[in-house]
Image (cartoon, helix red, strand yellow):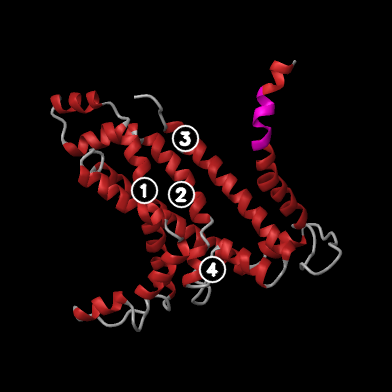
Amino acid sequence: MARKFLPYFYVLPLLAFIAVFTYIPIATSINLSVREWDFMSATKPFVGFENYQLLLTSTEFWNSVKITAIFAVISVPLRLALALMAASFLTSEKFASRLLRGAFFLPSVTSTVSIAVVFSWIFSTDYGVANALLKHIGVGKIPWMQDPQMALLVLILVNSWKQIGYDIVIYIAGLQAIPQELYDAAAVDGGRRFHVFRRVTMPLVMPTTYFLLVISVIEAFQVFTIVNVMTHGGPAGATDMLVNMLYRVGFTLFDIGTGSALAVLLFILLIALSLIKSRVIGRKVHYEA
């Protein structure tokens, strides 16, 4: 009996940690999502699904869903495509390749707030570096953070620049795991570089792509710090993504019930997207060369 339950005893501290910081907060959010609470009241009256109904009939909520979806649809394929191209040139163990790997990876471990502040200066309309460079080539000032469409594109650029280093490192690991014999056989058969990449590299790196796709979509739907520092959801709500709206509703307006309902809806949305990706893309992933 002791031998049977001993492994569970070893993992008990980890299970307790996960329960305290994951499962209990999720259960608490679900409980608060059906109640009305403002942080100050001693009571938390049960209101049923009123908070969910308020969100699902709100144009502000659906606007945040649309903006977050646009952000994910543009930023995730852009990140993965650029990361795969960069990784294909950095698989060697030469000093220059290793140096570039570190340079690309550095932003992913840098403070997001610091990156957002620096890029806010770069894309400032009046004294930003971007407009200063454009001025030298005869282009007028561009209101990067004041134009609704440009502001979202800037956020996509900044977030991709920060996260792409991690994608590159993971892709390098995936590319280095591909047997060299397959490339040698393709070269003997006279395969061109593009066809080798399409027929050999892409299928064998698909597990890595699938992994990065899952975590990139989750990260895109949870982006907050860059938005909060650079645009605060503006201008005119053009960058008001789901987590930014959650923060505003829950911790600025102190409507904890509606904020918790929004968190639950985001949780359900991410689970649904993960299941869809598993059904559509997961079946095409092969883990053996």
Mark 1 and mark 2 residues within 8 Å of each other at the beta carbon:
yes
Work out how far the residue at label 1 is from the one at label 2, CA to CA, in angstroms.
9 Å
Residue at (48% x, 38% y) in the render: 280
Question: Which disc number belongs to residue 282?
Answer: 3
Q: CA distance from mark 3 to mark 4?
A: 31 Å
Camera-nearest label, 3 or 4 = 4
Disc nearer the start of the sequence (2/4): 2
Crowding around mark 4 (Cα neighbors within 10 Å: few <14, some 14 to 19, many 20+) is many
Q: Look at the image and say whether residue 266 sits in the magenta stretch.
A: no
Do labels 3 and 2 touch, CB within 8 Å?
A: no
Residue position marked by numbered label 2 in the rendering: 216
Residue 237 at x, y percent in the picture: 53, 73
Label 3 or label 4, whichever comes before in sequence order = 4
Kindly state the secondary structure of the residue where label 4 is placed.
Answer: loop
Q: Disc 1 marks which residue?
A: 80
- Rounded to the nearest angstrom, the CA distance separating label 3 from label 2 is 15 Å
Pick whichever of labels 3 and 1 is earlier in the sequence.
1
Q: Secondary structure at mark 3?
A: helix
Q: Which residue is mark 4?
A: 240
